[in-house]
Image (cartoon, grey):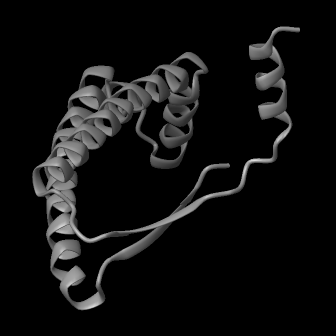
Amino acid sequence: MSSVAERLQRKSQRSVATKQVRLKLVYVDFWSAVKLSFLIAVSLGIVLVVVSILIWIVLNATGIFGSLDNLLGEILNDDTFSIAASFSLVQVAVFSIVIALINVVVGTALGAVTAMLYNFSVRLTGGLLVGFTNN
């Protein structure tokens, strides 16, 4: 074996000591928190719109709307009421988009408020102690 290979073999046999570092989180950047909360809210809004449309498609394809129309027609003695006509795919999609937009605004505002409250509370508490190891 060459000398380099022998040195590498000896290094791999040594046990590495575990190092631990403790840091305090004493400041959260306001604009970074706002941007992150905005991106999370937008992604959750997209998920909300897609899931609501998929649920409507599945309910329509399985015939649950027709079964509910028949059941409500028997209970109310009214054959003109239709759930599928009342809650069409377009209406469900528009409603979920409006709710998603409201959630984006509220989620972004909550992220900003949380960052501000954390930065104010650090003055009293001293920050969050976080430990890291090299495992």
**Which quadrant: the N terminus?**
top right
Q: Using the image, determine if residue 44 lies above or below residue 19.
A: above
Q: Total marks drawn?
A: 0
Q: Residue at x 18, y 85 (%)?
A: 123
The percent coordinates of residue 49 (x first, y second) are 33, 30
The percent coordinates of residue 101 (x first, y second) are 16, 40
Q: Is residue 82 visible?
A: no
Q: Using the image, determine if residue 80 lies above or below residue 34.
A: above
**96 sits left or right of 130 in the view:** left
Q: Using the image, determine if residue 31 lies above or below residue 43.
A: below
Q: Is residue 95 visible?
A: yes
Along the viewing direction, whichever of 12 and 55 lies nearer the viewer: 12
Q: Residue at x 40, y 32 (%)?
A: 52
Residue furthest out toward the bottom: 124
Quadrant in which residue 3 is drawn: top right
Quadrant in which residue 106 is drawn: bottom left
Along the viewing direction, whichever of 34 and 74 lies nearer the viewer: 34
Q: Using the image, determine if residue 62 lies above or below residue 22.
A: above
Q: Residue at x 68, y 57 (%)?
A: 18
Along the viewing direction, whichever of 42 and 112 lies nearer the viewer: 112
The percent coordinates of residue 42 (x first, y second) are 25, 36
The percent coordinates of residue 132 (x first, y second) are 54, 59
**111 sits left or right of 80 in the view:** left
Residue furthest out toward the top: 1
Q: Residue at x 32, y 33 (%)?
A: 43
Along the viewing direction, whichever of 67 and 4 lies nearer the viewer: 4
**85 sits left or right of 7 in the view:** left
